Image (cartoon, coloured by chain):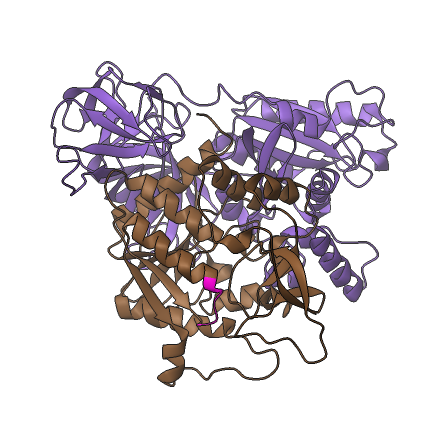
Amino acid sequence: MERLRFATVGSVDDGKSTLIGRLLYDSKSIFEDQLEHIEAVSKRRGDDYVDLSLLTDGLRAEREQGITIDVAYRYFATPKRSFIIADCPGHIQYTRNMITGASNVDLAIVLIDARTGVIEQTRRHSLLVSLLGVPHLVICVNKMDLVDYDQGVFNRIRQEFEQFASRLDLQDVTFLPISALAGDNCVTRSKNMDWYEGSTLLHHLENVYTASDDNRIDTRFPVQFVIRPQRADFPDYRGYAGRVAGGVLRVGDEVMVLPSGLTSTITGIDSPTGPLQEATPGQAVTVLLADDLSITRGDMICRPNNRPRVAQELEAMLCWMDDTAPLQPGKIYSIKHTTKVARTKITEVLYRLNISTLSRETGVNQLAMNEIGRVTLHTTAPLMFDDYHQNRTTGCFIIVDEATGQTAGAGMLLSPRT
Amino acid sequence: MKTSLDGLIDESVTIIREVAAEFERPVLLFSGGKDSVVMLHLAVRAFAPARVPFPVMHIDTGHNFLEVIEFRDRCVSEMGVQLIVGSVQASIDSGKVADVTGPRASRNPLQTVTLLDSIAEHRFDAVFGGARRDEERARAKERVFSHRDSFGQWDPKNQRPELWGIYNGRHRQGEHFRIFPLSNWTELDIWTFIGEYNIDLPSIYYAHTRPIFKRDNMLMAVTDFLPPDEGSVVEHMQVRFRTVGDATCTAAVSSSAATVEDIIAETAVARVTERGATRADDRMSEAGMEDRKRTGYF
């Protein structure tokens, strides 16, 4: 059975929690003790209805304030697929938490209230989905019951969105008219919207085609750990463990190791569940080579005729995440990229992106918490990387404050502007 | 063989290797419970044919199910890993904590002190736990690499963002990380793994008959440490344990599931979460787990 990771983005007002509650409830993934618990809490607080957001808002502070602050993970399964939901906050002050939740999903759901249409928040969420390179986006036009299930309203919102989204890099966008509260087009088809011929949300989640989302062309294998058993029964075993970041590794393939540039041939691939003939993106394997090369953590195995870029002067979109200090150009930070750790200085903020209007603000040389900008950076050691849009795994990095240890920034490497 | 667990196994193995690469003194918490058993099996597979490069540790309340302790010792000896035992009894004897008394006493909350003392004593900087996000609301919010300050405290409002598959384990001396490689596994995934890879478990996970008394609608097993409550009726019932913890606060469920297949079938249609069904410790308050985790609990 396949597994799909998806993010839901939005605030309680959009009906996000109701939608998740609906998916969980209709797929029978809410347990009785959980339901009893939230019923009791809702009643005690004097709510008119059972507040399904209590299912996902797990922290004391969230329940007290009635908002989602941090990402919550929920799990459900149908006979067709297993699902991991990253339930993300929608408020602008929790942008970093939304990015955290949406960074590694296959699909994102953005909710639009049918009564208000595309608003600033919709634009912001869609921009972040586009920046993060999430392969599939679903726009749920929710609360259709409150606009008399009017096709005209749905079409107008759709056009409005498409006009705005033409400026974004979105690969696959699906529009769905739903009512999470009434259940229209969530799990079962709506009888109230005969004009809608597409599938229900759950059907879409079960069937969206994700097999081609991984980069299966450019072979990339960052070495994570060298396995050398100190055991008499394996005197010569030397394996390079890691997770395939791109392309396919096959026994017999000629490979090149960077940064040394030395070449060898794959003689075997071990995995946690036994030996393999080939390994594809996402698989955690151990690669055995014909030659005894000096290879350490942080090195990259690729093909001699298809190598990542290698550079110390880099350009990236950077989201600042540290609430204690803004990004300071010139300050030394730690950078972690694939399995490699180095030090870095941000040399320049080229522009700050206004995430509500998409306008580029120049002349700022700082990024505060939740701000995103295009930067140049310089690293103490060369990174072996790809453009983020070619490969999310070899194109992403984090910046760590060396004094506090905080994850201060998250970046996506891009080809330099010409 | 491709299975639904492939992505999960790959993720967990990657997390375990990352910790071995970046931390100086990791340890894996191993109670003999099913999640810690699966975690240990994944660690073995992560480094094979080399041995697991860190020890395992059990925080022992002294109030155990006999079958689980026997299993624990057999398991570590078969896997060739070193076992460290942090003893709650020793913490009581040294005066660090006072033993609990009374009709509903459980040493479960005392474990936090022993756990933090053991981490400090051995200078562990990364502590693997088998907790899953589907277990409980507060756990659904926790990172895979979860920072603990020098008091062992979790600050849920100030968690480090955790993006893509990059983990940040930077810490100062005296601080440590809790690492949760099974974060994205569900109870059903755990049982699927146990079935597919023929993983041995303590016998009490499968249906058996034992003396039981009822407390707050939970089925409590009569043991040396847990005499029946006054006025309760002891019955011989067919039960199994969905979770295995301290014998004084872990309840059984009525079940005839004798094999992994039976349990998978039962889990697939279960209407109550495993902690809701079996853990007296989670029933204390709405934020019971969050509060305990803040002060350093598992």
Nearest to the observer: residue B283 or residue A121: B283
Compared to B284, does A254 lie above or below?
A: above
**Which residue range is magenta in the image?**
B62-66
* Residue B150 in sight here: no
Residue B113 on the magenta segment: no
Majority SS type along the magenta span: loop
Residue B64 on the magenta segment: yes
Q: As drawn, is A376 to the left or to the right of A282?
A: left
Nearest to the observer: residue A66 or residue B108: B108
For the colour brown, the matching chain is: B
For the colour purple, the matching chain is: A
For residue A64, what is the image quadrant? bottom right
In the rendered image, the quadrant that contains the N terminus of chain B is top left
Residue B241 spot, x, y in % from top left: 58, 56
Residue A386 spot, x, y in % from top left: 33, 26
The residue at the point 78 percent across, 54 percent down is A50
The residue at the point 29 percent across, 44 percent down is A335
Residue A328 spot, x, y in % from top left: 33, 50
Q: As drawn, is A176 to the left or to the right of B16?
A: right
Q: As drawn, is B159 to the left or to the right of B258?
A: left
For residue A345, what is the image quadrant? top left
Compared to B293, does A271 lie above or below?
A: above
The residue at the point 81 percent across, 33 percent down is A144
* Residue A53 in sight here: yes
Q: As drawn, is A247 to the left or to the right of B195?
A: left
